[in-house]
Amino acid sequence: MKLAILSDTHGLLRPEVVEYLKTADVIFHGGDINKQCIVDTLQQYAPLYIVRGNNDKEWAEHIPHDLTVTLDGVTFTMVHNRKEIPADLSGVDVVVFGHSHKYVEEEKNGILWLNPGSCGPRRFHQEITMMMAELTDGKVQVEKISISHEVK
């Protein structure tokens, strides 16, 4: 199963990102979407698991603050801000979050922590990134995707 993992699009869905979405079986979005049209577009490509970010206001009230989902025996929990992740992660294999716009891929205490960074408008001079991941036999293999050029 191929996963596209993104966050902090802030109203911009870059064409390069869409090309990766076309190959995904599932899409995770870690919040700060900013517009319903982004959600609608993402849903056209694959089943979408999404959480609300701090910039997702009234229009996003129906989007959950946090979400836990199990795919092929791997349990993912998602929340926008890492500071709001529950203390008890019993049974969780992968934590997906956003907010900082900084790419993170690290394993701690048997849990894989993933922040795809931001693939929306460039902010804070951060690299523009997302993740693609392969889920096979209960294992997650992650690939960092760097988006190189600016939107004109």
Image (spheres, helix red, strand yellow):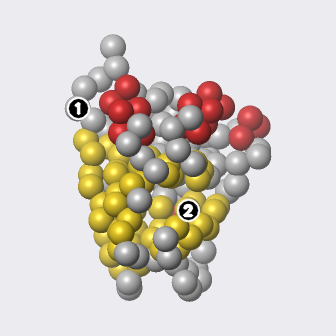
The amino acid marked with disc number 1 is Ser
Q: Residue furthest top?
A: 152
Name the residue rendered at 70%, 54% in the picture.
64
Relative horizontal placement of residue 70, taking residue 58 as reference (left or right): left
Which element carries disc 1, helix, strand or loop? loop
Instruction: Residue 85: give x, y in percent of width and height.
Output: 56, 69
Name the residue rendered at 35%, 57% in the picture.
133
Which element carries disc 2, helix, strand or loop? strand
Cα distance between the residues tagged 1 and 2: 26 Å
Total number of numbered labels?
2
Answer yes or no: is residue 65 visible.
yes
Instruction: Residue 73: give x, y in percent of width and height.
Output: 50, 76
Instruction: Residue 77: give x, y in percent of width and height.
Output: 55, 68
Nearest the camera: 9 or 81? 9
Density class for disc 2 (Cα within 10 Å; few <14, some 14-19, many ≥20) is many
- Quarter-of-image position of residue 67: bottom right
Density class for disc 1 (Cα within 10 Å; few <14, some 14-19, many ≥20) is few
Q: Is residue 121 above or below residue 66?
A: above
**The disc label shown at residue 78, or none:** 2
**The disc label shown at residue 148, or none:** 1
Q: Is residue 70 above or below residue 80?
A: below
Q: Quadrant of the C terminus?
A: top left
Nearest the camera: 99 or 6? 6
